[in-house]
Amino acid sequence: MARLVADAMTRRVVYLPADTPLDEAAQAMRDQGIGDVVVTHGPTMAGIVTDRDIVVRAIAENLPARTTTLGSIATRELIMIEQNATVEEAVQAMRVRAVRRLLVCDTDRKVVGLLSLSDVALLPTSAVA
């Protein structure tokens, strides 16, 4: 039986405003034990930033962590998958789009979680084809 995205996803999604400085975002990630935050602009989702993005797009480019904002380094394209999709479908979507994370939504397109490659890697081997 195929595993569903809902079985593997992380249900906690952390949202931070686009004007949040990178050092504050990194501290929030550390404190909550997460590797990504959804970036917001007012009530709308404006992108996603991962811990790797902070390193590659900011630190490696010598951008100051105290004044560089999430909005300036965020990936703007947000890719979603429904929670009732199979893990195999999610992995295929990640491959096609060359991403490591997908936002997970319900049938009304409301975000209910996030699925990362590490979530998939933690599944029992029989759950992933």
Image (tube, rainbow, N blue to C red):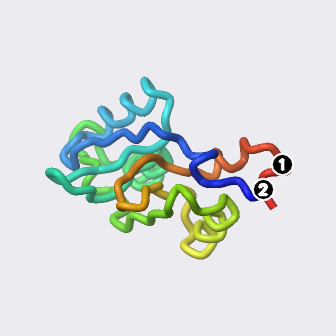
Q: Is residue 40 left or right of residue 128?
A: left
Which dot marks residue 74? none
Residue drawn at the location 24% of the way across and 51% of the way down: 40
Q: Is residue 51 left or right of residue 71?
A: right
In the rendered image, residue 62, in percent from the top left (x then y), is placed at 36, 48
In the rendered image, residue 37, in percent from the top left (x then y), is placed at 38, 44
How many numbered marks have been drawn onto this rendered protein structure?
2
Q: Residue furthest top?
A: 31
Q: Residue furthest bottom?
A: 96
Determine the image quadrant of residue 22.
Answer: top left
The residue beneath circle 1 is 125
Residue drawn at the location 26% of the way across and 59% of the way down: 46
- Local SS, label 2: loop
Q: Is residue 9 above or below residue 12?
A: below
Q: Is residue 19 left or right of residue 99?
A: left
Q: CA distance from mark 2 to mark 1?
A: 6 Å
Quadrant showing the C terminus? bottom right
117 and 50: which is toward the camera: 117
Quadrant showing the N terminus? bottom right
Q: Are marks 2 and 1 in contact (CB under 8 Å)?
A: yes
- Local SS, label 1: helix
Amino acid type, mark 1: Thr
Determine the image quadrant of residue 93.
Answer: bottom right
Residue drawn at the location 60% of the way across and 54% of the way down: 5
Residue drawn at the location 44% of the way across and 37% of the way down: 12
In the rendered image, residue 51, in percent from the top left (x then y), is placed at 47, 43
Amino acid type, mark 2: Val
In the rendered image, residue 29, in percent from the top left (x then y), is placed at 42, 33
The residue beneath circle 2 is 128
Q: Residue furthest left?
A: 42
